């Protein structure tokens, strides 16, 4: 972090939120370098705890979204899930959604005429399950160490 770094403001927003929706494009079968940098910044939160000694991100819920014109969405989702739970986020059932266009083509998700039914259904499940888990954790936080 240094002069002009947006991370302090982003961090404040993450800490104020109950849910983090973490989105990334697929680049050469991997998450973007910006997404990787966010995970690296979140790793610093491991040493931060709340007043009861829980990790500061415990009780927050994360969901993932991946788009791209190449495969890799399942691997990226798995990497995101692992990193996000390592730093304290919880992941609801089916809390990942993705869209991959045809390999070696130039159609981007933003250029589609509409959201494919399968993606819309997966995204609705993601939203429903993520909100449900966030409400449960708000009512019944993880126990203090």
Image (cartoon, helix red, strand yellow):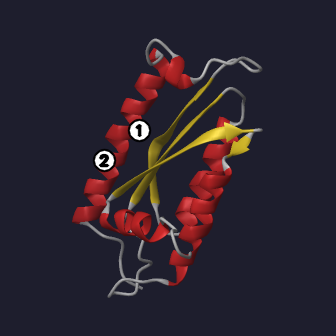
Q: Which mark is residue 21?
A: none
User: Which residue is the extreme one toward the top?
Assistant: 113
| Few, some or many residues within 10 Å of mark 1 (<14, 14–19, 20+) | many
From this view, report whether residue 61 is shown above or below residue 5: above
From this view, report whether residue 115 is shown above or below residue 30: above
Residue at x 61%, y 39% (from the top left corner)? 25
Q: Which residue is mark 2?
A: 131
From this view, report whether residue 109 is shown above or below residue 20: above
Badge 2 marks a residue whose secondary structure is: helix
Residue at x 65%, y 57% (from the top left corner)? 36
Quadrant the C terminus occupies = bottom left
Residue at x 57%, y 69% (from the top left corner)? 41
The quarter of the picture where residue 136 lies is bottom left
Percent x, y for residue 54? 41, 81
**Along the horizontal axis of the image, is 131 left or right of 47?**
left
Q: Which mark is residue 126?
A: 1
User: Which residue is the extreme one toward the left?
Assistant: 139
Looking at the picture, tell me which residue is in the foreground, 10 or 29.
10
Badge 1 marks a residue whose secondary structure is: helix
**Along the horizontal axis of the image, is 140 left or right of 142?**
left
Q: Earlier in the sequence, mark 2 or mark 1?
A: 1
Percent x, y for residue 8? 44, 71
**Along the horizontal axis of the image, is 144 left or right of 94?**
left
């Amino acid at each position: 972090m240094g002069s002009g770094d947006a991370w302090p403001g982003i961090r404040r927003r993450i800490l104020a939120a109950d849910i983090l929706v973490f989105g990334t494009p697929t680049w050469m079968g991997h998450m973007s370098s910006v997404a990787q940098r966010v995970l690296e910044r979140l790793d610093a939160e491991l040493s931060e705890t709340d007043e009861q000694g829980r990790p500061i991100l415990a009780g927050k819920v994360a969901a993932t979204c991946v788009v791209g014109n190449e495969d890799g969405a399942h691997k990226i989702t798995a990497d995101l899930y692992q990193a996000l739970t390592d730093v304290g986020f919880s992941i609801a059932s089916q809390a990942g959604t993705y869209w991959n266009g045809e390999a070696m083509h130039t159609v981007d998700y933003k250029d589609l005429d509409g959201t494919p039914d399968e993606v819309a259904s997966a995204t609705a499940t993601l939203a429903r399950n993520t909100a449900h888990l966030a409400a449960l954790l708000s009512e019944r936080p993880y126990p203090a160490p």
